[in-house]
Image (spheres, rainbow, N blue to C red):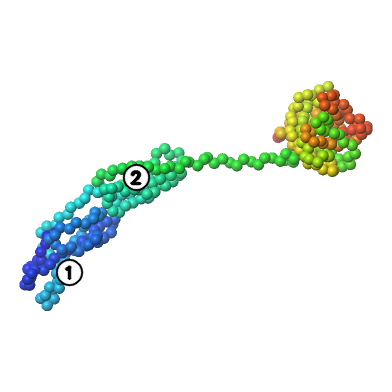
Amino acid sequence: MEASPPAVGALVPPRRTGARLRLLSNGSWLPLAPLDTLPTGTEQSFPAQCASALMAEMLIEGDAAEKRTGVLIPGMLNGRRIGLRFTRQPCQLSVAIGNEPPFFSADAPLPEAGLVVAGLARAINRYLSDHPSAAVVPLNIATANTHPLRIIAFEAELEAPPPAATPDAPPPEPTDQPRPGERALLPPTDRIPRVARLCDADHAAGLRLAPLPQGVRLSSVQLQLRNPGDEEARGTLSLHADEHGSPAGTALASWPIALPAGDTPRWVCSRLPAPRPLAGQPWWLVCRAEHGSLQWYADTHCPDLIDAASHCRGSGPWLPLDTPAPAPWLHLQAGVLDPED
């Protein structure tokens, strides 16, 4: 910058002149760094800085008692030439995802060695999390000037999308409780048991019942049992069609049953795997024990819906129970579900 005082003063040498510079950057006037007060008549170099406007305040050496003070104060100057040299660096880089606020910004010019954009992977993963079906991420890169910008390398480690949420599996239904809505098929009994039939690996016992009404489904059964052993007894309950007065060889349905050791008989409830209609012909409930033994208690006064009680040994024939007389039956309660409306 070249300038001189408006009139030559009487004192020699002439007054010193200079200027105080300000830069408009990001909407604010800032002093020129690192030195904002410059003498005129010399060329100065500065680190690259971003600015959209330049303001110069003219300064002239003041005097006191016709002597120079050496201090530059605001004053009038005759300017002859002002020159500026600019770099070709992109300024005020900002990086954003679409129309979101920038997640990265740099106020200074970009250095020639390049600049690492921090937060890129985090911003992209956040966008993909908010837009799980997106196949493209709108990356918005902008600068305050029009100088070319070169992307040297691009790398973003994307997170795997979270697995689709699956509803929690409903808890399994208890197999030792009646299903909701069941009603009793047989009248309750409070008789004290006196005799029991053995069910183990070589003995089985069964009851034959009358057909259920149309639409009524057998849902659960309760047997009065005891485990006389020292360990848990495990067996099988099964439903069979009637075949010439005996259980058919192939079961209609079967499910496991277990009972801990105990000194007294107890009612053991067991759900069928699924409610089952048993209309049209008599059907059998058979109890076997594969591990340990079970005692199925019997009594007189057979209910009307029970046709017969039998036992068998090994692969031998099914034989009717002969005790207790006159009409023995194995203690049983049954829960049924009525037809749905």
Question: Residue placed farthest to the right in the image?
Answer: 326
Residue 249, by quadrant, is top right
Q: Is residue 70 above or below residue 43?
A: below
Kindly state the secondary structure of the residue where label 2 is placed. Answer: strand
Residue 214 placement (x, y as % from top left):
76, 29
Residue that label 1 marks: 73
Give the structural element (helix, strand or loop) at label 1.
Answer: strand
- Tell me the CA gap for discs 1 and 2: 47 Å
- Residue toward you, 152 or 65: 152
Quick one: which residue is furthest to the top in this view?
Answer: 244
Residue drawn where x is 77% and y is 36% of the image: 234
Residue at horizontal 11 percent and vertical 68 percent from the top: 15
According to the picture, the residue beneath numbered tag 2 turns out to be 140
Q: Residue at x 37, y 49 (%)?
A: 118
- Location of the C terminus by quadrant is top right
Image quadrant of residue 331?
top right
Q: Is residue 201 left or right of residue 66?
A: right
Q: Please state the horizontal and vertical placement of residue 176, each as a whole percent of the image.
A: 74, 40
Asked whether residue 279 is in view, the answer is no
**At label 1, which amino acid type do we have?**
Ile
